[in-house]
Amino acid sequence: MEMLLWVNWVAFLAITVYALFLFVKVVRTRIAYIKLGRKTEFDHDVKQRLKDIGVYVFGQKKLLKDAKSGAIHVMMFYGFLLVQFGAIDYIWKGLNPGSHLPFGIFYPGFVFFQELVTLTILVAVVWAFYRRYIEKLVRLKRGFKAGLVLIFIGTLMVTVLAGNGFGMIWHGHEAAWTEPVASVIAMSFSWVSPTVATVLFYIMWWIHLVALLAFLVYVPQSKHAHLLAGPANVYFNRDKNHGKLEPINFDMDEMEESDEEPSFGVGKVEDLSDLQLLDLYACVECGRCTDVCPSSVSGKMLSPMDVLVKIRDHLTEKGAAVTGQTPWVPSYAFSDATGNQVVDPNSEISSQVTSKELIGDVVTEEELWACTTCRNCEDACPVMNQHVDTIIDLRRYLVMTEGKMDPEAQRAMTNIERQGNPWGLSKKDRENWREEDETLNVPTVKELEKEGEEFEYLFWVSSMGSYDNRSQKIAMAFARLMNKAGIKFAILGNKERNSGDTPRRMGNEFLFQELAEKNIKEFEKNDIKKIVTIDPHAYNIFKNEYPDFGFEAEVYHHTELLAELINEGRLEPKEAVNEKITFHDSCYLGRYNEVYNPPRDILQSIPGVEYVEMKRNKENGMCCGAGGGMMWMEETSGNRINEARTEQALEVNPNTISSGCPFCLTMLTDGTKAKEVEEEVTTQDVAEVLERSIFGEEAKVEQPA
């Protein structure tokens, strides 16, 4: 027996050392692949980043948004952490028969707790199997690889319970309350001899050990790499930037000194940043991002998860070719895998992999143009992946390097470049909307300067507010409310240009920077310190992205200012608005800037309003379909996103669908028309609803013709 124990020890050490070697090798290759990306500068706010680990990794905050899947994951996550102590005890028993972990009087309680944890994990495994293969959730993949982890975990739990049962027979232990399952197994096999029980124990012990070590090697070279990359991704997360895009350096001197052809955006996988590449290996492939993506759910060719997974697989193959490090181990078991074959730089398959076009061969143009940049995918992602900046970086390459863009989008870009608005209307007519109401006091900065008067806020009307007939009503309603509250404001009038959000989100970074430079000069010339706007897109870009170009100011969305004026008593809603109203969250106001309460506070302060929430609201609110420049492109596949969002609003039977964004309001208005309910359900900006309560009968409810 002693000789067999020595053999067992030698075999244990050999296989364990080998497995650890393979594990380290795989992790190092993935790190080498990630390092192919551009190095990212990020803040070292360790306290906040550790807090994020606590909230999103150990607190499972995002996973619990889906109660069922979240519960399964919590059971597995904490169960697997806790059961490792039981695994150590189990391996100890096989290496040193008759002994166990030295927990003294606490050992019986430890054993009982481990059995409970093991049973909990088994319940989670069965539940997860049911959700994936019986209930067949659409967002979950159902191949062999997807279920392999359940087989591993199930095997580990069953073998430890069975092994402990056979161990009780081997050592002649009586049934005990501290090991209820193992005791039942021992009683069921009480007819076998101690010798047979010993053999059965070691069979279970070795199956457990091999499964544990195989799982260890499997994890970093599978989708379960998220167990390692996920926490790292949460720590290094870029989410605190609220979707802020990184500027491109258009330094012509540097370009002229370089021997390479000028290239803008991301045309090769290594053009992505190292943290964008970390996203790829952190992906859980849970499908939550795709499940909430407005383009995906409306039948368009976009799955945020598939975009990341396809780029990840391409990175693994190209990374192997570039670094010469084998991605799949043990390598002899994966000799036919492309990733292992491309390690030989002289192989034909190596040149095929390295010559693959990221846009075209890996990700399609159709996928890139389907994104509305709403960031709902990012809100849903449990490991804080950021899909949108990766997609926009690829768009940048298409637009600025390859010169490819949808004709309608190109027309809007050209119009913005020439006239400062997407329609190509004369920039000299930008301030003409004021003429709709001669009683309205909306001075330009130039007019106040001539009169020697000062102002507190620059009212950024935006292209929608200046030219779109329906949006002009919003601008006028907000101006009336500011007049009523005694707010000193001015507009730039014909000096106002496009904010640059549309060009930037559509990939035309050069045009955006040109607009930003001109706008900033105008702001600085007029000593602008506070900006208020009805356009969440302008609000976001002024607040979060203009600082990269040297301009900072206090930026307010009009609902924030109106809520503040109501709280201060400068505006008093008096007249009842006896309507059932629901509110649609603009993505650029909500998910990008976490402004959820002000518009709701305004509506709930109005007498007579019955406020109701849509099922998908606030951070989980669905996009209207206009973001990312999609306002200027026709939807040619699937169903219309704005109609799907309108249907969600109509589910709560409102009289009015309200919004805080002219883009959203346009899309929702079109949605009510498509559903033929425009006579029964109105669409209004929050400012318009408030205007009706402040001014009563004087305020007209105007709907578009």
Image (cartoon, grey):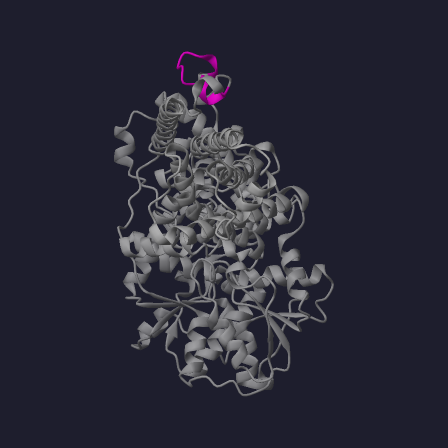
Q: In which image quadrant can residue 87 be found? A: top left
Can residue 643 be seen by looking at this rendering? yes
Is 696 placed above or below 195 here? below
- Residue 566: give x, y in percent of width and height: 45, 81
- Residue 279: give x, y in percent of width and height: 42, 41
Extent of the magenta region: 337-349
In the picture, the quarter occupied by the C terminus is: bottom right
Residue found at the very far bottom of the displayed protein: 574
Can residue 405 be seen by looking at this rendering? no
In the picture, the quarter occupied by the N terminus is: top left
Is 602 placed above or below 108 here? below
Question: In this orientation, which residue lies closer to the viewer: 94 or 249?
Answer: 94
From the viewer's perspective, is 351 left or right of 126? left
Please tell me which residue is depicted at 42% across the width and 80% down the height of the picture: 565
Question: In this orientation, which residue lies closer to the viewer: 173 or 508?
Answer: 173
- Residue 425: give x, y in percent of width and height: 52, 56
User: Residue 146 magenta-drawn?
Assistant: no
